[in-house]
Amino acid sequence: MAVGLLRSKLPADLRAKVNVRSAGTLGIQGSHATEDAVVVMKELNIDISEHVSGGVTESLVADSNIILVMANEHTKYLQKKYPKRRDDIFLLRTFDRKSKPLGMESIPDPIGLSTEAYREIRDMLAEEITRVLPRLVRLIDDYYALAPAL
C-alpha cells in the first residue's frame, strides 16, 4: 500500500525518474497484494492489483538512495545486515521529524486483520507519506541537480 500511495503522490515529473520499490525483510517472494489491500487502495483510485512481493536483496539496497521502513524491527534488521547503508535507512514515522510522533513509531502490518484495519493502516501510511513528501521531493531534486546526466 505504501508504494502505491507514494507513487500516486509523487509529482508527475518525478515519477519517471524515481523507482519506488517494496521489499520485505522476511524474504517472501511472489505473493500478490491481499484482497483487502487491493480493495482499500481502490477506494482511493490506486490500483495495486499487479503488486508482487519480493524480499530485500543486496542489489536492491545498493541501488537505493533512501530506504523507508514501516517498523522499528525493520530498521534494526536492515542496519545490522547492511551496516554501510545505516545512514540511508529510516523509519517512516520518524523520518524528517523534529520530535517523536505521538503514539507508536511503527506502522503495523495489516496481514490477517480486518478490512477496516487495512483502511486505518492505509490512512496512517497516507498521512505519513503526505508529511514526508516535500522532503523527499527536495532530496530527489537535489540528487538530479548534482547528477544532470542521469
Image (spheres, grey):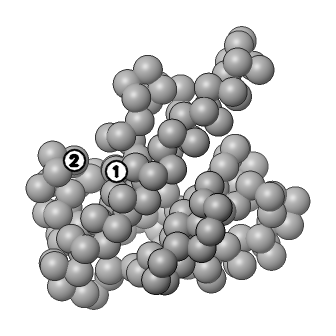
Q: Amino acid at mark 1?
A: Leu
| Distance from the alpha carbon under mark 1 to that under mark 2 | 7 Å
Task: Give the labeled residue for mark 1.
Answer: 5
Q: Report the front residue among 110 and 31.
A: 110
Q: Is residue 11 visible?
A: yes
Q: Residue at x 45, y 52 (%)?
A: 131
Note whether residue 106 is visible: no
Element type at marker 1?
A: helix
Q: Are marks 1 and 2 in contact (CB under 8 Å)?
A: yes
- Residue at numbered disc 2: 46
| Horizontal side, residue 112 vs residue 3: left or right | left
Q: Compared with residue 125, is residue 73 higher up or lower down, i.e. above or below?
A: below
Horizontal side, residue 39 vs residue 60: left or right: left
Q: Quadrant of the C terminus?
A: top right
Q: Position of residue 25 (x, y in %)?
A: 58, 74
Q: Position of residue 112 (x, y in %)?
A: 27, 87
Q: Residue furthest top?
A: 149
Name the residue: 77% across, 71% down.
Answer: 79
Q: Residue at x 62, y 26 (%)?
A: 141
* Residue 91 picture location, percent across and down: 60, 67
Residue type, mark 2 in image? Ile
Q: Please provide percent x and percent y for residue 90.
A: 65, 62
In the rendered structure, the answer to whether residue 55 lies left or right of residue 33 reads right
Label 2 secondary element? loop
Q: Find residue 116 and name its label.
A: none
Q: Earlier in the sequence, mark 1 or mark 2?
A: 1
Please give left or right for residue 93 compared with residue 124 in the image: right
Tell me: residue 87, above or below residue 109: above
Q: Is residue 42 above or below residue 37?
A: above
User: Can you say which quadrant of the picture contains the N terminus?
Assistant: bottom left
* Camera-side residue of 49 and 145: 145
